[in-house]
C-alpha cells in the first residue's frame, strides 16, 4: 500500500499496489498535505500482537500493517539550496511521514520501520531467510527512526531559529542533531574512539579534502584553531598551529612571505604542525615549506602549481576550505551538560592610552596585530610581535608572568623593539617589567586590575607605551 508518487512508481515498475485511498475511502486533500493521517492506517500500525487489538481491527474492517517504509520530504536539502524561499522551505516539512515513522517505531515489538534505503537490502535478506525481521533488527531500526525524526525536527528548529529576530541569541532549548559524517581512526590517543558529526553533505570543517589520509581527531582540532585565527585577519595571513596552540601568526603581501614570517616565530614548534592560509596556496608557498614536516594545510584553494609540488608530500593533507558561515555560538561538553557561548568576535574595542607615552604609529599597528593574534592563544596568553608577525608566543600557562618569560625566550633577540599583547590584565607590574627586560617597547592589555595604577606607574617608569582595550580575550 502506498500513497501518491510512491504508488505510481511501484505501478510503473510492474508491482501490485493498493493506494491509501483504497484503504481509507477518502481522497488525498489539501494538495496532498493530508493523505495518511487516518485511523485505518495508524490503527493498523499501532495494533499490538494481541487478540483484543485483532478484534478491534476486524470490527472496523482494517488489517494490521507490518512494515512501514518512509523517506521524509527533503527539508534539509531544500533549505541548503541557495536562494530558497521561505514558502518553499515550509512546504518541505513532512507531517504524515513523521507520524507514520513514530507510530511504527513505537510499536517495534511487531512492526518494522525503515527510514533509509541503505537498510532495504539487509531487511529483505532477513525476511527471506526468517519469514520476518528479527526482534533485535526491529529494535535497531526503531532507534534509527527516532533519531531520524529527531534530526529532522532539529533541522526545522535550526532553520526557523535562524530567521527569528533573536536568531543569534542562545536558545532556551539547545537542539543538536548531526549525522555521523565520518568514523575517525581514534581520538586524541589510540585507545579512544572518535567520530566527526556534521550536517549531511558538509565536508570536514566545511571544506574538501584534496590530498592525503583522512583527517584525524587532532588534525581537525588543530586545523579548526588555525583557520579560525587566519580568518580573523583581513588580507593575506598564515597561521601555524601545533597541539591547538598557534606558534606563528603573520600577515604579508603574499602567502609565501606570511609563511616565512610565521615560521620564524617558532620554527622548532612548527615541525609536525598544521598551516592555515587566508589566501590561495600557490607554488611559491608550497616550495617555501622546504623540508618542514607538515601534517595538514587549510586554504581557500590550491593552485595547480601548489598541488603539483605538494603531491610529493603523500602524508600531507590538503583541505580546501568552503564558504561555510560561522556558527552563532560554540559548544563545549562538560560533565553533566554542555556549555554554550557566543563567539569571541571583534567588539570594536575602545582603546585608551594609559601611559604618559603614546605608541608610535608603527607600534600601534603592531599592537593591533598582536591583539588580534593573542585572542587565539590559550590563556594565560602573551604575544610578542614585530610589525605584522609574531616573534614569540607564550600560552596555556597558569602564571601570566611565566607566559611573558616564555614568549620572551621564544623571541630571543627579536624581542628588541617588539610590542606585547596580553589576553587579560596584568595583576602585578612584574609582567610589564619582564617584557621590558626582554626589549618590548609597547604593551596592549585589557586593563581593569585593582593594581592598574602600579602597572601604569611601571610603564611610565620604564618608558613603554601602555594601551588598555577594556575587553579581554580569555581562551580556555
Image (tube, rainbow, N blue to C red):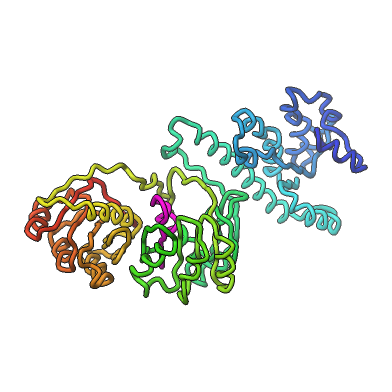
Check residue 227 for magenta coloring. Answer: yes
- Which segment did they paint magenta? 225-244
Say which quadrant the C terminus sits in: bottom left
Which residue is rendered at x = 43% and y = 45% of the image? 329
Q: In this view of the protein, can residue 336 be seen by the observer?
A: no
Q: Residue 417: where, in percent of width, then height?
A: 20, 64
> Does the stretch in magenta take in 396?
no
Inspect this view and state whether residue 439 appears: yes
Residue drawn at the location 18% of the way across and 66% of the way down: 439
Q: Nearer the viewer, residue 167 or 66?
A: 167
Q: Quadrant of residue 395?
A: bottom left
Q: Is residue 353 left or right of residue 293?
A: left
Q: How many marks?
A: 0
Where is residue 382? Give x, y as percent: 26, 61
Image-based side of 242 in relation to 41, left or right: left
Q: Is residue 356 left or right of residue 343?
A: left
- Percent across and percent down for residue 252 are 38, 58
Give the answer, above or below, for where 340 lies relative to 85: below
| Quadrant location, the N terminus | top right
- At 38% from the left edge and 52% from the top edge, which residue is drawn? 233
**Residue drawn at the location 58% of the way across and 74% of the way down:** 312
The correct choice, above or below, for 242 with respect to 169 in the image is: below
Amino acid at each position: 500500500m502506498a500513497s501518491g508518487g510512491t504508488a505510481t512508481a511501484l505501478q510503473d515498475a510492474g508491482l501490485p499496489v493498493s493506494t491509501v485511498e483504497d484503504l481509507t475511502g477518502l481522497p488525498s486533500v489539501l494538495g496532498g498535505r493530508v493523505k495518511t493521517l487516518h485511523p485505518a492506517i495508524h490503527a493498523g500500525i499501532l495494533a499490538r500482537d494481541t487478540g483484543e487489538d485483532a478484534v478491534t481491527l476486524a470490527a472496523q474492517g482494517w488489517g494490521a500493517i507490518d512494515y512501514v517504509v518512509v523517506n521524509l520530504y527533503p527539508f534539509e536539502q531544500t533549505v541548503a539550496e541557495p536562494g530558497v524561499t521561505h514558502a518553499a522551505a515550509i512546504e518541505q516539512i513532512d507531517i504524515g511521514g513523521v507520524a507514520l515513522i513514530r507510530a511504527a517505531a513505537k510499536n517495534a515489538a511487531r512492526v518494522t520501520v525503515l527510514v533509509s534505503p541503505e537498510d532495504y537490502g539487509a531487511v529483505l535478506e532477513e525476511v527471506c531467510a526468517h519469514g520476518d525481521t528479527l526482534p533485535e533488527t526491529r529494535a535497531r531500526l526503531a532507534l534509527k527512526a527516532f533519531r531520524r525524526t529527531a534530526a529532522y525536527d532539529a533541522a526545522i528548529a535550526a532553520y526557523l531559529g535562524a530567521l527569528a529576530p533573536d536568531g543569534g541569541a542562545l536558545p532556551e532549548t539547545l537542539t543538536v542533531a548531526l549525522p555521523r559524517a565520518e568514523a575517525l581512526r581514534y581520538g586524541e590517543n589510540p585507545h579512544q574512539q572518535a567520530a566527526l558529526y556534521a550536517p549531511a553533505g558538509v565536508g570536514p570543517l566545511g571544506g574538501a579534502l584534496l590530498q592525503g589520509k583522512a583527517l584525524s581527531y587532532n588534525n581537525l582540532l588543530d586545523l579548526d584553531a588555525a583557520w579560525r585565527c587566519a580568518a580573523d585577519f583581513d588580507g593575506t595571513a598564515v597561521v601555524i598551529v601545533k597541539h591547538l596552540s598557534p606558534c606563528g601568526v603573520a600577515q604579508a603581501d603574499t602567502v609565501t612571505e606570511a609563511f616565512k614570517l610565521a615560521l620564524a616565530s617558532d620554527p622548532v614548534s612548527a615541525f609536525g604542525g598544521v598551516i592555515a592560509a587566508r589566501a590561495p596556496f600557490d607554488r611559491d608557498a608550497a616550495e617555501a615549506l622546504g623540508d618542514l614536516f607538515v601534517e595538514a594545510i587549510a586554504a581557500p584553494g590550491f593552485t595547480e602549481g601548489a598541488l603539483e609540488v605538494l603531491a610529493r608530500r603523500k602524508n600531507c593533507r590538503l583541505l580546501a576550505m568552503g564558504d561555510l558561515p560561522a556558527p552563532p555560538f560554540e559548544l563545549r561538553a562538560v560533565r553533566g551538560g554542555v556549555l554554550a557561548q557566543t563567539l569571541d568576535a571583534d567588539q570594536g574595542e575602545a582603546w585608551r592610552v594609559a601611559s604618559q607615552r603614546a605608541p608610535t604609529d608603527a607600534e600601534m599597528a603592531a599592537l593591533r596585530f598582536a591583539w588580534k593574534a593573542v585572542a587565539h592563544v590559550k590563556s594565560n596568553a602573551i604575544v610578542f610581535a614585530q610589525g605584522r608577525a609574531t616573534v614569540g608566543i607564550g600560552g596555556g600557562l597558569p602564571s601570566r608572568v611565566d607566559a611573558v618569560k616564555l614568549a620572551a625566550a621564544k623571541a630571543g633577540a627579536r624581542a628588541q623593539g617588539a610590542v606585547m599583547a596580553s589576553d587579560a590584565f596584568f595583576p602585578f607590574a612584574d609582567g610589564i617589567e619582564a617584557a621590558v627586560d626582554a626589549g618590548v617597547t609597547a604593551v596592549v592589555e585589557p586593563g581593569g586590575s585593582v593594581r592598574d595604577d602600579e602597572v601604569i606607574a611601571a610603564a611610565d617608569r620604564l618608558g613603554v607605551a601602555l594601551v588598555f582595550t577594556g575587553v579581554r580575550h580569555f581562551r580556555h
